[in-house]
Image (cartoon, rainbow, N blue to C red):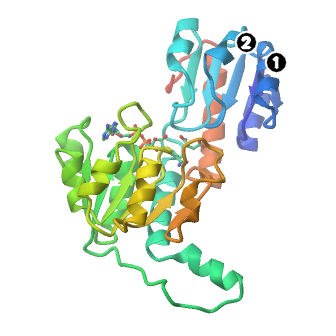
């Protein structure tokens, strides 16, 4: 069986594929055109979040049996198109959640304490402490939108900082809110009105894209601080820009942008916004977990065995 690894996964994952007798081509630099040209040769492809697996792709992928998503969200994969063709899609939903939660906390603290901005000044050999005053987390309210795997890890960690944690997630049981000691908000507006910090942890869906937009910022506390380590656009980027200009939002920590890779986002022009280039899952541990897990799943799917995350 021939597998194309089209985005970077850990060496351990590649070794696993090879040790199981697969023919593996690692080519993470293919242009879209080149990818479409070669994909017809492969039984499986492994991608992360950049490669768009869509109708155009499937039409060319005539031998394809498995798509391995080395990560969590499957928003770059047309699931209906796969199902229609009997192509199995596997992902690794558990493998990077701790890293994503820790990155969220990192963004939250870095942005509310101006850590990257302070380092940038010192990088220019300037010792200047003006306009870098931050805020504490203790006794503040954080509103978590989406209390799933990552949202709940974030909740547990922020409780340890003495924060009051509230969440909005209409799709989970009350028992889950209780389990994490999180106050349930019946609607987003309630959360927006009460939160000093807001962090989003929903999948990217039609419903969640732009779910924090103009109307939501209008009812938010003045000086609210936001974090998006989920998917670009869940917090509407234009609305965020306006809210920053109007000083409704005091700071933002962002890991994901619409149209990635996006090194020219207008959000980069704000001194009180810090942005990382989709690094939420980029740790040694998460990438090893993800690489090994996706390799195992692709092998199992190609062999017609049971796959836990298909
Ligand atoms: P999950 O499926 O475990 O949890 C998502 C939660 O969102 C669920 O509880 C669901 O009920 C809730 N939800 C769905 N629609 C909602 C809505 N309209 N309003 C409120 N809540 C809603 O997912 P997860 O593993 O926690 O991942 C969360 C997000 O993080 C995903 O977008 C994923 O792609 C992203 N992610 C990003 C990185 C990164 O590198 N930045 C890494 C891993 C995951
Ligand atoms: C994910 O959904 O797992 C993340 O966005 C991380 C990644 O794609 O590497």
Of the four image quadrants, the one with ligand 1 is: top left
Checking the image for residue 14, the label placed there is: none
Residue drawn at x 49%, y 44% as measured from the top left: 231
Side of 192 relative to 40 (left or right): left
Q: Residues at badges 1 and 2 in contact (C-beta under 8 Å)?
A: yes
The answer to whether residue 45 is above or below residue 185 is above
Q: Quadrant of residue 301?
A: top right
The answer to whether residue 239 is above or below residue 64 is below
Residue drawn at x 46%, y 44% as measured from the top left: 233
Residue 20 visible in the displayed image: no
Side of 25 relative to 177 (left or right): right
Image location (x, y in percent) of residue 74: 52, 31
Total numbered labels: 2
Side of 36 relative to 79 (left or right): right
Q: Is mark 1 within 8 Å of ligand 2?
A: no
The quadrant in which the N terminus is found is top right
Residue drawn at x 83%, y 28% as measured from the top left: 25
The answer to whether residue 121 is above or below residue 31 is below
Near mark 2 (Cα within 10 A), the count class, few <14, some 14-19 or many ≥20, is: some
Q: Quadrant of residue 174?
A: top left
Q: Secondary structure at mark 2?
A: helix
Image location (x, y in percent) of residue 116: 58, 73
Q: Secondary structure at mark 1?
A: helix
Instruction: Mark 1 or mark 2: name the one nearer the start of the chain.
Output: 1
The answer to whether residue 4 is above or below residue 246 is above
Q: Nearer the viewer, residue 187 or 72?
A: 187
How far apart are the two marked residues, 1 and 2, measured between alpha carbons?
A: 8 Å
Image location (x, y in percent) of residue 189: 21, 50
Q: Name the residue tied to disc 2.
A: 60
Q: Name the residue tied to disc 1.
A: 37
Residue drawn at x 68%, y 29% as measured from the top left: 46
């Amino acid at each position: 069986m021939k597998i194309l690894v089209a985005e970077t996964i850990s060496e351990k994952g590649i070794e696993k594929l090879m040790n199981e007798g697969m023919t593996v081509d690692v080519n993470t630099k293919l242009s879209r055109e080149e990818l479409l040209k070669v994909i017809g040769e492969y039984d499986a492809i492994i991608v992360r979040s950049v490669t768009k697996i869509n109708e155009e792709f499937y039409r060319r992928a005539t031998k394809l049996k498995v798509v391995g998503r080395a990560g969590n969200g499957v928003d770059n994969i047309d699931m209906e198109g796969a199902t229609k063709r009997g192509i199995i899609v596997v992902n690794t939903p558990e493998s990077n959640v701790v890293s994503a939660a820790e990155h969220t906390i990192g963004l939250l603290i870095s942005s509310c304490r101006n850590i990257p901005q302070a380092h940038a000044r010192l990088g220019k050999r300037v010792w200047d402490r003006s306009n870098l005053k931050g805020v504490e987390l203790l006794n503040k309210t954080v509103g978590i939108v989406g209390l799933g795997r990552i949202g709940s890890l974030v909740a547990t960690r922020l409780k340890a900082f003495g924060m009051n944690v509230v969440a909005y997630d209409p799709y989970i049981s009350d028992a889950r809110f209780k389990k994490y000691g999180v106050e349930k908000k019946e609607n987003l507006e309630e959360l927006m009105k009460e939160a000093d910090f807001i962090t989003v942890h929903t999948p990217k869906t039609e419903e969640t894209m732009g779910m924090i937009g103009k109307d939501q910022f209008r009812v938010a506390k003045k000086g609210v601080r936001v974090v998006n380590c989920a998917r670009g656009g869940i917090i509407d980027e234009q609305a965020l820009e306006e809210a920053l200009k109007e000083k409704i939002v005091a700071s933002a920590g962002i890991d994901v942008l619409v149209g990635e890779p996006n090194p020219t986002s207008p959000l980069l022009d704000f001194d009180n916004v810090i942005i990382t280039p989709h690094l939420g899952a980029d740790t040694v541990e998460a990438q090893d977990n993800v690489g090994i897990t996706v390799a195992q799943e692709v092998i199992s799917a190609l062999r017609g065995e049971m796959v836990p995350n298909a």
